[in-house]
Image (tube, grey):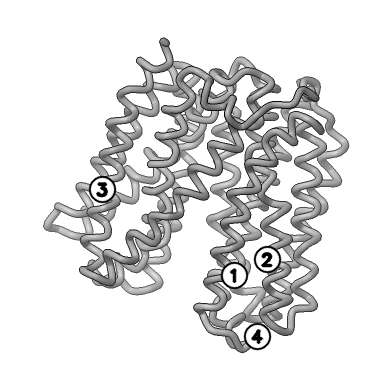
Amino acid sequence: MKKDKGILLLLGVAHSLNHSLFLVLPPLLEIVSRDLNVSFQTLGIIVTISFLIYGVGALVGGPLSDYLGGVKLARISIGLSGASTFVFILSKDFHTFGAGMFLMALWASFYHPTSNNLISKIFVTNTAEAMGIHGAAGSTGQMFTPTIAYLLGALIDWRFAFTLFGVLSILTALVLGKFPASKDTTIREKVSLLEIFKVPSLWILVFYNMIGGLLFRGVELFFPTFLSVNRGFSGQLAALSYSLIIFFGVTGQLLGGRAADRYGSSKVIIVSSLAVVTSILFLLLLPLNIIGVIIFIIFYGLAFFSHQPAMNALIGIVSPKKLAGMAYGVMFFFAFGLGSVSTTIAGYLADAFNLEVAFWSMALFSIMAFIVSLAIPRALKK
């Protein structure tokens, strides 16, 4: 049991680093662009392709974790994604930089379905709480990484910022090997992707996750700009506001995990979905802008992140053991890969109209997610 708790702690560190590898670039975008003499558009294309790989790779990582074992594949994912950052040391043009991003995204893509599948096997009785701890650790890393990366990149070199988090990833992979999980079983039976959609009630969880991904990606990308352009916030205050969302998200992950184990995952998903709708409406409708923003930051941060451990626990419950890894891969692909489409939708609406209209589209996604959440309890009974 102590070893299992040790693995959860290390997976929390690994989760934080998995996200951190991709959060190094945003605060250093201008520096990298100038140093490599490439446009923002070129860097944007590289990042888009990298995120697509990050989402599609999860479809492979899920079933591969069943075949190789969760701890083994988690170590491979963490270690090799960290090692890929050494390519940036050689980066003198966008070709080498793109190769580094490609390799980093490829190896990192295996992590999420692998870790979620592993946690569902190890923590059978308190699955949601364990998922919440794992998710909270990942969110904690997102809070601090941009600041650390910017300081290292501005004071030393942007390449060093990437390799620092790469070295930490490699060290985590090495330490993880000293804590083999007691219930980390392997499944050598071949399964088809189509079998996932034959699992009763799984399709509605996939659908809910996709809508949640559409909401989250749009808010994530445009919220700071929305505050600057539409609410008159300074750039620094707008950036801090999104950091505060993640701060409350850490609390939401922990509370959501415990509440799901105590009251049921489907109830937590319904309540959190309603709270997300409420938070966005406060943001858009309150005449006193600062009050609406504060309510949104607190309610959205707590509510949106609280549904994640509940959802991850449900996937482990409804999926047959031989399909669990693939199920987590499919869920991550729909939430992260297809969910990223909302950034294009919101961007189009912002250019054609304004960011206020773009955020009303996010409100529409939140309402859709709440409606779908109401159908989850009934689907689970079938």
**Which residue is at a point 36% across and 63% down the rendered structure image?**
222
- SS under mark 4: helix
Q: Position of residue 326 (x, y in %)?
A: 64, 32
For residue 133, what is the image quadrant?
top right
- Gap between marks 1 and 4 measured at Cα: 13 Å
Q: Position of residue 309 (x, y in %)?
A: 51, 31
Nearest the viewer among 147 and 53 is 53
* Kind of residue at disc 4: Leu
- SS under mark 3: helix
Q: Which mark is residue 36?
A: 4
- SS under mark 2: helix
For residue 75, what is the image quadrant?
top right
- Quarter of the image for the C terminus: give it: top left
Q: Earlier in the sequence, mark 4 or mark 3?
A: 4
Q: Which residue is mark 1?
A: 46
- Gap between marks 4 and 3 measured at Cα: 39 Å
Q: Which residue is mark 3?
A: 363
Q: Earlier in the sequence, mark 3 or mark 1?
A: 1
For residue 268, what is the image quadrant?
top left
Q: Which residue is mark 2?
A: 101
Q: Position of residue 27 (x, y in %)?
A: 54, 72
- Quarter of the image for the N terminus: give it: top right
- Gap between marks 2 and 3 measured at Cα: 33 Å
**Is 127 displayed left or right of 344 in the figure?**
right
- Of labels 1 and 4, the one closer to you: 1
